[in-house]
Image (spheres, rainbow, N blue to C red):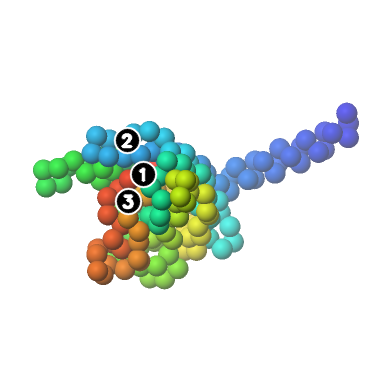
Amino acid sequence: MKNWIPALALLAITHSAMAEGSLAVPMNMVDENGVGASVGNVVATESKYGVVLTPALTGLPPGLHGFHVHENPSCATKEKDGKKVPALAAGGHYDPQKTAQHGTPWGEGHLGDLPALFVDAQGRANQPVLAPRLKLSDLASRSLMVHAGGDNHADHPAPLGGGGLRMVCGVTP
């Protein structure tokens, strides 16, 4: 029994360090009626290369989807031009430097620009993406957003990469 005590202490310390270096963000479908059903979560982990975002999502349309950190910690609908817009209360892409420029996750532009999220033919997203300019602390009190369309990381030919409607949202602690 005494031989197990140091092993259990090491396990507890390791688990605690891992918990401090990551956070899980519950993700839900969103539409003009508000926040809907859970589709899973995204775990954000600090690494020496930036933040790794590992999705465990199901029930999504297959293909590439725009994936971003948004400025506000809300997934609520908000009215724009007389229409309810899904998760509009999340605000725009996280842009603390006020660049007002959509760009690549590793270049200039919004700090909230992430690599596109890949959803397989069965509707599952589980491929990690790396956000090399982010730190875990940048995610505090923000929201993660998955858009209906892809993202070309440019404002041409469509604004904000052409991601379109907000489809899935989660609020970070």
Above or below, 117 against 88 in this view is below
Q: Residue at x 28, y 43 (%)?
A: 87
Q: Which of the 4 image quarters holds residue 168?
A: top left
The kind of residue tagged 3 is: Ala
Separation of marks 1 and 3 at Cα, in angstroms: 8 Å
Query: What secondary structure is marked by label 2?
Result: strand
User: From this viewpoint, which residue is outermost toward the top?
Assistant: 1
Task: Estimate the x, y position of residue 19 in percent, counting from the top left.
Answer: 60, 42
Q: Which of the 4 image quarters holds residue 78?
A: top left
Q: Earlier in the sequence, mark 3 or mark 2?
A: 2
Task: Estimate the x, y position of residue 150 in percent, counting from the top left.
Answer: 35, 59
Above or below, 99 against 62 in this view is below
Q: Earlier in the sequence, mark 1 or mark 3?
A: 3
Foreground residue, 161 or 24?
Answer: 161
Quadrant into which the N terminus falls:
top right
Q: Which mark is residue 35?
A: 2
Q: Report the residue marked by disc 3.
A: 148
Classed neighbour count for the residue bearing mark 3: other residues with Cα under 10 Å, few (<14), some (14–19), many (≥20): many
Q: Report the residue marked by disc 1.
A: 168
Can residue 81 be spotted in the picture? yes
